[in-house]
Amino acid sequence: MFKRFLRWPFFLLFAALVLAALIPILRAGYNGIAHAISTTPQITEAASVAKGQPFQLHVQGFQPSEEIQLSWNGNGGQFLGMLTTDANGAATNCATSTNCVVSPPVSGGTYTLTAIGGTSRLQVSTSVSVTTALVVTPQNVGLGSTIQVLGNGFLAGEHLAIYFQLPANGTISTTADGTGSFTQALTLPSTYNSQTSYFVYVTNAQNVVRAKTAFSFPILSLISSTTKATGGGLITISGKGFLAHESISLYWDLQRLRSIRIGKINADAAGNFTQTITAPFLFTTNHATLVAKGASSTLQATTSITLISNFHFFNLGNHSGGLRGRGR
């Protein structure tokens, strides 16, 4: 019994030594797990960015004062710039004027942006959509009209060329301002095909298309304030889709009768016009066609109007239809 009692201190001492050896190992393992959890990198980026504009980007979970390399798969894979994390291992793009990464010229679309820690080699990625904005105003104006082309999301000071459908229609040079925006007047061509889809294009100095937007010509039309009119009555008509400022001839097509010339009117800057005319006096009611024809464009629009005669002929014969005889 005495010998067994003497063994207990030995076992207690041995257990204490083993526990002392395990504590640093367990502590190191715990710290390693905690460090791994605390340094899981994260990246927050706005869903879209315009070309030439800064990325709305924030990273965290990297080492303090670490250089973060930014790249993406745009343009076949491209280095974008560097960010430096703060004491908490976080960084925000454009937090200072010397630490600002912008979207380079690239075709519009969705790209994968990646941040890699220079020391830790930690890596995180996110998706970002790159856009440029191009607006044409007004839409639905006639041939030869002048429209305004408004663009943003281009490079600051970028030299650009604008054209309608084809460079052969004429190009206009412009330069984006310090914010990557521009406003430029553009004159539409004098002819078009109603079956064709039209676009306004913007190209850079290398003749690469940077942006395009659709343009719609108005449907050629002639509208009347009434479908029936008596001679001397007033009719208000409106035409749309003609060549800007062109002279437009107005006349009545009276089917088998001769045509009646009304006069001429000039379209406005958008190729539209409004005019009040007087219905002609006719001996018989006629289902006539009112015609508006452009002198330069030769575009022609029509509308149907029933012209009601001012003259009424009555049969003045015997209303009985014959002579009445006496009954026998």
Image: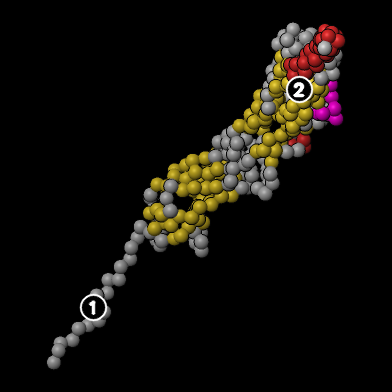
Q: Residue at x 48, y 55 (%)?
A: 304
Quadrant assignment for the N terminus: top right
Mark 1 surroundings: few (<14), some (14-19) or many (≥20) residues within 10 A: few
Q: Is residue 86 shown above or below 212?
A: above
Where does label 1 land, which residue?
320
Q: Is residue 277 left or right of residue 111?
A: left
Judge by depth and name the residue closer to the eye, 309 or 212. 212
Q: Secondary structure at mark 2?
A: loop
What percent of the width, then of the height, locates residue 322?
A: 25, 81
Chain-order first, disc 2 or disc 1 = 2
Q: Is residue 47 shown above or below 258?
A: above
Q: Is residue 310 left or right of residue 271?
A: left
Q: Is residue 104 shown above or below 92?
A: below
Q: Residue furthest bottom?
A: 328
Q: Residue at x 51, y 63 (%)?
A: 256
Mark 2 surroundings: few (<14), some (14-19) or many (≥20) residues within 10 A: some
Where does label 2 land, which residue?
103
Amino acid type of the residue that numbered disc 1 sits on in the rendered structure: Ser
> Which span is picked out in magenta?
73-82
Q: Residue furthest left?
A: 328
The answer to whether residue 47 is visible is yes
The answer to whether residue 83 is visible is no
